[in-house]
Every structure is written in C-alpha cells, then in structure tokens.
Image: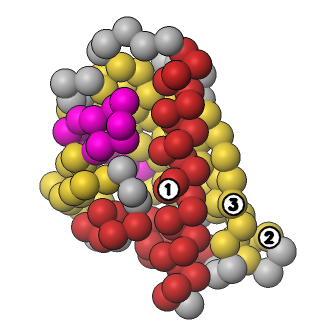
Amino acid sequence: MADRTTSSILITADPAAVMEVIADFPAYPEWAGQVKAAEVQETGDGGQATRVRFVLDAGVISDDYVLGYDWAGDSVSWHIVEPGKMVSQLNGSYRLAPAGGGTEVVYELAVDLKVPMIGMIKRKAEKVIIDTALRGLKKRVEGRV
C-alpha cells in the first residue's frame, strides 16, 4: 500500500452531527465533488452501511468500485472490496474528535492504481480528493446545524 495522504478540518458541530452526514452515502453527490453516485449495497446490524458502490470522477482518477466500511465510535474506515478499472486499492478513514467548540475531522486516504502514475501526481490527486471532501463535509454539516 502506498503512502497515505492526511488532512484535517474543524467543523462547528458535534461529532454525532458530523458522523450523520458521513453515514448518508446517497447524499454524497450533493457535497463530495468527485462522487457522482453512491449506492448502499449492504448494512450492518446498527443500520450503518457496510458495503457501498461508488462512481468517482476526480479528473485523473475516474472509476466505479465498491468499498467495505468499518464503524467504531467516532471513526469510520474503509477498504476496497471490488476494485474498479483504474483503482486497485483504496483505504481511508475519518476520525472525529471534539475540539475548539466543534469537531476536528481527520481524513486519511491511500489509493493505488492499476495504471502507472508518478507518485507525486497520485498524492496530488489524493490531496484534491481529501480537501474537496473535507470542505464539502464542513459546508454540508454546518448548513444543517
């Protein structure tokens, strides 16, 4: 697995409100810029998605794949269970922690592609995905509070 790209943001809401938006996969195309579709395929005992199909268009990385999700308190992690045509591995997580009257959200992502790509370009694409997702998440959560 390649190096991980990590970034964080402070959202003016409690962790439960942030996690509610993170768990609402069908709404991702409304706020997560690169996600064109997200379909929950399976849920666990608590009703949270455990398997989600995504259609992604992030410029250099465009694909259709399925992720498996693991929920643990104020964090959620994911891994690829059905690779796409371009994406061979995709692992990531959101970790939430109360901070400064809100919630600090740390997003970590590592992507491996089936096609050769210079590491610097791949990390830049990961950074764009993360930063766009964090800004979209902040706007979505704070718009609901």
**Which is more N-terminal, label 1 or label 3?**
3
- Residue 71 lies left or right of residue 74; in this view the side is left
For the point 31% across and 22% down, the residue is 88
Tell me the number on the disc at residue 133.
1
- Where residue 85 appears, x then y in whole percent? 19, 24
Q: Name the residue at the bottom extreme.
A: 145
Question: What kind of element bears circle 2?
Answer: strand
- Image depth: mark 2 or mark 1 in front: 1
- Residue 92 lies in the magenta-colored region: no
Question: What kind of element bears circle 1?
Answer: helix
Residue range (magenta): 56-70
> Mark 2: which amino acid?
Ala
In which quadrant will I find the C terminus? bottom right
Tell me the number on the disc at residue 99.
2
- Where residue 66 appears, x then y in whole percent? 23, 41
Pick whichever, 118 or 3, lies toward us.
118
Q: CA distance from mark 3 to mark 2?
A: 10 Å
**Which is more N-terminal, label 1 or label 2?**
2
Q: Quadrant of residue 15?
A: bottom right
For the point 21% across and 56% down, the residue is 37
> Mark 3: which amino acid?
Ile
Crowd tier of the residue under label 1, counting other residues whose Cα lies within 10 Å: few below 14, some 14–19, many 20 or above:
some
> Mark 1: which amino acid?
Ala
